[in-house]
Amino acid sequence: MSLMCFWAVLWVFTVFQDHALADAIASCRPTTGGSSTTVRVAPEYEVPVYLAEYPAVSNLNCLAHCPSYNNCQSTYFDERAKRCYILGIQQETTGYETSSVVESGGVVTNLQAQAVNALAESTYSECANSPCSEAGRCRATCDTREVYCVGDLSDCEETPFSNIYEWTTTTSKSVGTGTAFTISYTKKKGAETGLYLKWSGTMRSAYNVAGGCTYWVFMIDGSECADPGRIRYAEYHSQARNHLKHTEFFGICNNIAAGVRSISLSTVRCSTDRSNHVGWNARSRITVAEVEYGVGSGACASLSTFNIQYLNKYRYSSTRSENVHISETFRKRASDTALVVHYSGNLYVSGSPVCSRWYFKFNGAECQNPGTVDMVFYTQGETSVHRGYAVHGLCEGLAAGTVTVSLHVGACYDSYSAGNPHTGWNQENLLIMEESRLGNDISAVLTPNGHAYRLPVVNRQHGWWLNLDNGNNNALIKAFVYNKVYTDSGINVIWSFNCRILGNPNCGRWYVTFNGTACSNPGSIERVMHEGGPSEANWLQPCVLDGICHDIPSGPTSVELRTAPCSGYSGHGMYTGWRSTTNVIVEEVFVGV
């Protein structure tokens, strides 16, 4: 890399003007010019992972080592130990800063990139074919020539999602009562951001126990979330069953301090919770991010997603007959955006055969563009089921202003009995709502001083189908063509649909491919469903399948939902999209930004 491009990419969270956090990119800084910010910090300050460590006699001596590392963005000089740390990201020092030399433990220097030219499109050949949807928005980094499309934040005060991290594993393990997995996550900001958590993977609760029940919970530094409430999943089945099924639940926790946080997936005793299991026969994922929600008032024309609002409400009731189970007011800021809903809660039906439907209304009507957002739950062969489920969907064509978002419970489209539905058993109703500009390709914003800052989520697109009714057990179910703009982004894909496996025992697998190939980095995006018990259970139930895949080139990408039998099973009776909607949401993400 040439000296002219030495400071080309600055992976750093920083506050610019009065705007929110983002990631500085793509400025070619000459060997002279530019600036740095130096602050004294208290002895309690600790450096994160560092690129290198040296003995040093002064901060100036420490800074002299930085040019030896192409990705040096910050230094920390420990005045007491006389040690120099070379760091690959800029440092957040809020809460540690001190003006006293006596009380100081060391010096942090964050190196600032030179401003890019905010007025002219890059002259590099990568911009010659106008890859951005609007002329004049294309820029390219000076060293790798990576294209990015720029906007601005003159009408916005937030970056809703940031510091996205996805942990994955293929480990399968039995868990009684206690911790299944623990991961570490470095939260970069304090109470001004919430902590978003999502589990996606196979679970089994109370193996072969009639009346068995288990809670699965997220713990943060050893405790369940208290503000605004718990993030958990609950399951109960009246018959002795061996359900190994994909589960997803998520939520946001407030007032979590900056720093390294310990995040655990654990079980809590419910009643009889023998031989719980997690991770069987499929890859598991825990997704973590920082979230700004409930702030700002602007239209945020450059953002793909913004204006997040969150409801965490415990309500367990026998809502039915098309009545409202939960309702929340959403303050929509723009008319050219979709309203996206993400719901996690516990559903119950009783009887055999019975069918109930959960669906969203917006200002008293189901969505017409592109269509309804719903979950259908049909059971035959088991009389009483409580289980956590999730759904993701969106609605376009809603004007700016107050929108009442309500979840209703009623009958399925056919003449089945509703089966005494209940919602919210021992599990909070968690609803995340946000505005989204579909197809927006802006991946960086320019500040008034001309710096470009990376956005974490960009280019969201959506597909919707009604009643796929596909009974193939080894086939391509549906393909959605997605135009990926950037080569250095990951693809985050979320499929919401209805699925089933028949047999006793039997197991089916649903998985995602990209242009016909399963994800290799970090691994397959998949879900399995295993049924086993005293009799065959015919459940047509809500299903979600999601994950992030890296190393997919830019250009048209076929994002495909497929089925196959699990290894060693027939996959007989697999069914996808029974008499309900199928949604897919696809977006590009820059992990860690």
Image (cartoon, grey):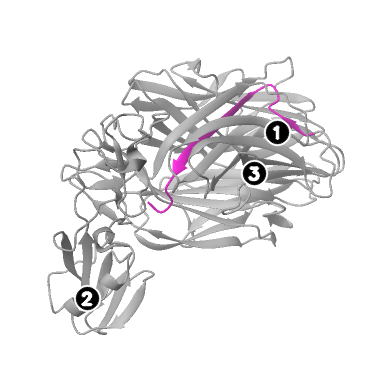
Residue at 49%, 48% in the rendered image: 230
Q: CA distance from mark 1 to mark 2?
A: 57 Å
Q: Residues within 10 Å of mark 2 (few under 14, many from 20)?
A: few
Residue that numbered label 2 is attached to: 64
Question: Residue at coordinates 20% horizontally, 80% vertically from top-left?
Answer: 61
Mark 3 or 1, closer to the camera: 3
Query: To which residue does mark 3 refer?
Result: 517
* Kind of residue indicated by mark 2: Ala
Q: Nearer the viewer, residue 163 or 386?
A: 163
Q: Choose the circle earlier in sequence order: 1 or 2.
A: 2
Q: Position of residue 130 (x, y in %)?
A: 35, 33
User: Which x, y percent locates residue 11?
Assistant: 33, 56
Q: Amino acid at mark 3?
A: Thr
Q: Position of residue 180 (x, y in %)?
A: 61, 60
Q: Is residue 440 magenta?
A: no
Q: Position of residue 536 (x, y in %)?
A: 85, 37
Q: Nearer the viewer, residue 327 or 301?
A: 301
Q: Which residues are magenta?
A: 574-593
